[in-house]
Image: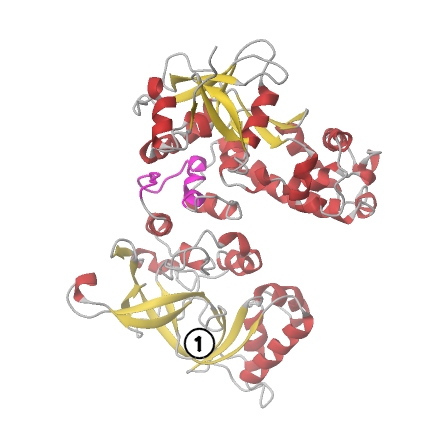
Amino acid sequence: MNPPEKVDIRSTDGASVIYRDVISLNSPQEEIRVLHLESGSGSSLLKCTLHRVSLQSVQAPSYEALSYTWGNENDRRAVVVNGYLVDVTFNLYSALCRLRREDGTRVLWIDALCINQTDLDERAQQVRLMRNIYTMCDQTVIWIGEPLEDLLPTWEILNEDDSTSIDQIFHAFANLRLLSSGHLSEQPLFIDMTGEEFSYYIPWWTRVWTVQEIILPPKATFIYGPISVDMSCLLEAFANLSRHMFEPCCSEVFSRCNFRVRKCFRKLGSVLTNIKNMRTSHDNGTNVDLWEALTTFRARHATDHRDKVHGILGLVNSWLGQPIVPNYRTTTEAIYCQAAIFTATGSQSLLPLHFPLQKHACPNLPSWCVDWTAASGLADQLNVYQWSQQPFKAFSIQQADRCHIVPHADNRILEVRGRRCDRVASVGKICQGDEPNEKRKAYCDWFLLAELHRDPSRMYRSGCSYFEAFWKCLCWDMILHMSETAGWINGLTLNTTFFVTDSGYLGLGPPGTNVGDEVWCLFGGHMPFILRPVATTREAVLGPGQKRLHQVLGICYVHGIMNGEVTNDESIPEEVLYLA
């Protein structure tokens, strides 16, 4: 018998051969392809066939969804698909080897094979079905990976010790089962754990697509080499760990644990907490909007930057308008702008502008748009963002009907309204990093900038002394007495700079703030914004008459205007601005 012909599924010609008999998928019927993995054992060739099924059929199709990371695209192995040899990544190959039954066919949904990846329209159409694909599957099989020795050096946590063995992997999963059932101090293996150490660093935990693959299905099973553990056991283990690790009953035991293990548990615990909370919301039918999904899983990575948005759409069940439709024929910048405008117009607020706006892989984004490729590195700056959502209403509730958000120029310019507060007259050092000496230098510089060394008791615009205004500025006026300020100041001043306005207002702003920038209260914002006048537009862009463009640097705290003093002051003219 002649060996099967080999085709490249990554090419258009190769894909047309593989998907020839199941080429067209009926979108209204929500058709998908499933993979029938034939039985076999040992080193025999993996064989499978593709079949079309409809998610809307009277008898729902039965299949398991495979969740995994594609792995190294250059490390590939051959499997037989519809009678042809096809190269798949080694990670997928090893998963299929583990999942193949010795007797009986196994029906799987696997994105790399069940979706024609060369067809951009089909990719987008199938991404729209992801919520149903994972909700309707029998379970998700989560392939963490094969513990092969030659892969161990790629895992950062093992760079000091590559002696991990199957025994340690078994101990890791055994300990998880034990942790799900009692106190840490009752677990004899807890002090000597090593297998858990590298689990957080395996790529599966960091990818954006894997989020919905664990949240949406009715059941999920983690498989790592020859060992498996149910998702409910894993979630309960870390919930139990969180309950006990700092309590008197178990804190001493946890403190004696290896530092790297403790660090790993904290990080993995944080990841699993987000997953558990979102899964609970899904199970209870709680509303999850686009912005919540984006910010919750902002740290997840995607090979295609567009998938930072596409990869969480299946989690959203509360759309404030027409849902965003996946589109692989448009740019990353266009998708990020669409997500920001959708959130702003749907919520009638400038919520996306409160998020840190630094750019990373998308430097050409408008200044007001979040670059989600940078969001995973902004943990230290999110304190400011989180706090801006709660205590202040620089935009008074009385002005809610005046929120004005209109996109222009293919969603690259945002028309808003607001009132100009003041102009930045002087700027201090940026408070960066955790080094105490550097922080002290910044605080001393700010102290001098506010001229507190001359007369700290002089009257501030809001009626208090300049010294009181200064320390309330540093802690956003969150506390009642100076003795409580240390923790607040440490978090709220990180990666900020201090400024003084022409009128003598004191404020904290984003690190890029310069002399000449302006403080604005925009209708729809919870905080004032630092804006920078940049240019005037041509008539072709925004219609007749020249209009001044502004860049958004970010939110700021300005003592004395945080409770609607400017927003509600009718003596200050209301203006239309164009943010670029």
Q: Which residues are magenta?
A: 306-329
Query: Can residue 498 be seen from the camera position used here?
Result: yes
Residue at the disc numbered 1: 514
Coordinates of residue 9 in the picture (x, y in percent): 41, 29
Q: Secondary structure at mark 1?
A: loop
- Say what amino acid the circle numbered 1 marks: Asn
- Residue 153's place in the image compared with 126, above or below, is below
Quarter where residue 219 is shown: top right
Query: Can residue 31 be seen from the camera position used here?
Result: no
Q: Nearer the viewer, residue 291 or 463?
A: 291
Measuring 37% from the left and 54% from the top, which residue is drawn there?
349
- Residue 401's place in the image compared with 253, above or below, is below
**Picture colour scheme:** secondary structure
Q: Is residue 315 highlighted in magenta?
A: yes
Residue reaching furthest bottom? Answer: 454
State whether the magenta stretch is mostly helix, strand or loop: loop
Measuring 50% from the left and 58% from the top, which residue is drawn there?
385
